[in-house]
Amino acid sequence: MVDSAMIPGQFEYVRPGSLDEALKVLRDREGEAKLLSGGYSLLPLIKLRLAQPALLVDLQAVGGLDGIARSGDEWRIGGRATHRAILDHDGLAAEFPVVRDAAGGIGDQQVRNWGTIGGSCAHADPSSDWPAVLIALGGSFVCRSLDGERVLPARGFFVDTFVTGIEPTEVLTEVRIPNAAPRTGSAYVKLERRAGDFATVGVAAVLRLGRDGRIASAGLALTAVGDAPFAATGAEAALIGAEPDEAAFRAAGAAAASAARPVSDSHGPADYKLAMVREVTVRALRLAASRVQGA
Amino acid sequence: MTTQHISVTVNGKVREADVEPRLLLVHLLRDVFGLTGTHTGCDTSNCGACTVHVNGRSAKSCTMLAVQADGATVATIEGLEQGGKLHPLQQAFWDEHGLQCGFCTPGMIMQSAWLLEQNPDPDEHQIREGIAGNLCRCTGYVNIVKAIQQGAAELRANPAAGAGAASA
């Protein structure tokens, strides 16, 4: 053993070969074990010793968790699907442009090569991009334990900073997104200080228009301006029944800002972020409306 | 201190080590295997100086554990030259002055090699997007982009010259 810099604290490491084996480790070592997927969220925290798990359970050898497929009335994306695989999936992007918007803005090429959607959502950094997208799309998470499977709606899953509805004995195996209804458009707009940075403000918008051209349903969720990503339900309610025009988008932006609770930090002061919530919401809605198919 | 025995194929050669699980891949390469071409820069997954290929995917080796690479195939900057002849990207960085201090260069070249495996003929925007995870504080990137364009042209004309990067 050569002397070398040791940046993280000590931990054990296992690499189970199957999902059941991983679930058994999680149950046997409940509260001590932490799942390792791509590692690009967790390892930086471990290196800073902000996270100090006793045991890392590496999922790289667990097969069958990285598929991306349309199945019946929903899309199913494996929890271990990388940001890159999602970004490159043309069928998914055609149905949900919001997904490609978000995937392309996560970190950089190396991060996207390894980081996974399930890892990112389970980690639940309030500045990460997938949660708002999945909330706006009405998505859900499949959480497996030895006791079975639970399907948790994305809306309500993100409880607090780094806290979700997932249990310590569960693996987030799959992300589900209901198929887009006709006349739906979607977009994710992220304001960032530098290319590939975490969002200062991010807004995911999904609009469905009725046959009369008015907004029949709306999903709007915000990144990085609260303890957790959240749905701007007041803004969603204000949009329904409105014409998809600037006045409606401005009103939604104001409603979204009234629900946002940003903190002042290196990305900017809180009042600046509130102004940006108003503006970025308008831009996301405008882009989503412009993408409505079959109007 | 508990160690685990790992076996990693680095630049085509199987190497073994007993390591603590907390050892980072970049430290395995540099401190255990003596392959100091891979640099440690920011150590926060940001700068890309530590970029290597793991099972054919570019990775920041400061953000991967050595034990995660157990059984994997790793390519580093040392594996690029073939028989004393520089890889076309190495030659291009030389010809186009794609570096000044050189600290970012091994990671920049490894990331460029991966980019060209995905897309042998990228336009300038795709090159800049491709190296967005690799910071250079000297050049302003202009000559790096030129070097990648030259390396890409050479590799398209002579794909065998890039064999070193394909060892992962």
Image (cartoon, coloured by chain):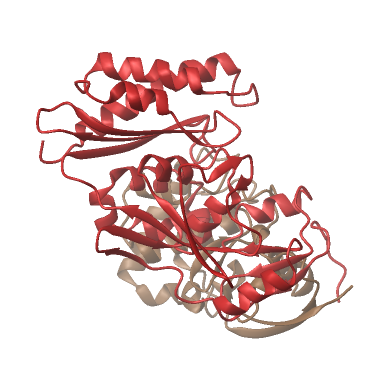
Chain colours: A red, B brown
Which residue sits at x=63%, y=23%?
A: A263
Q: Identify the image quadrant of residue B142.
A: top left
Picture mark count: 0
Camera sees residue B155: yes
Which residue sits at x=59%, y=69%?
A: B76
Q: Identify the image quadrant of residue B36.
A: bottom right
Which residue sits at x=51%, y=57%?
A: A118
Estimate the x, y position of residue A227 in percent, counting from the top left. 61, 33
Estimate the x, y position of residue A127 in percent, counting from the top left. 55, 38
Taking depth in this image into account, of B153 and A81 the one nearest to the observer is: A81
Extreme front residue here? A147
Camera sees residue B94: no
Q: Is residue B52 left or right of residue B2?
A: left
Taking depth in this image into account, of A148 and A136 the one nearest to the observer is: A148
Which residue sits at x=27%, y=31%?
A: A287
Taking depth in this image into account, of B123 and B69 the one nearest to the observer is: B69
Tell me the quadrant of the picture where the N terminus of chain A can be found.
bottom right
Tell me the quadrant of the picture where the C terminus of chain A can be found.
top left
Estimate the x, y position of residue A150 in percent, counting from the top left. 49, 61
In the image, residue A172 sits, relative to residue A219, either above or below, namely below
Q: Is residue A11 left or right of residue A287?
A: right
Q: Is residue B84 left or right of residue A55?
A: left
Estimate the x, y position of residue B37 in percent, counting from the top left. 67, 64
In the image, residue B128 sits, relative to residue B17, either above or below, namely above
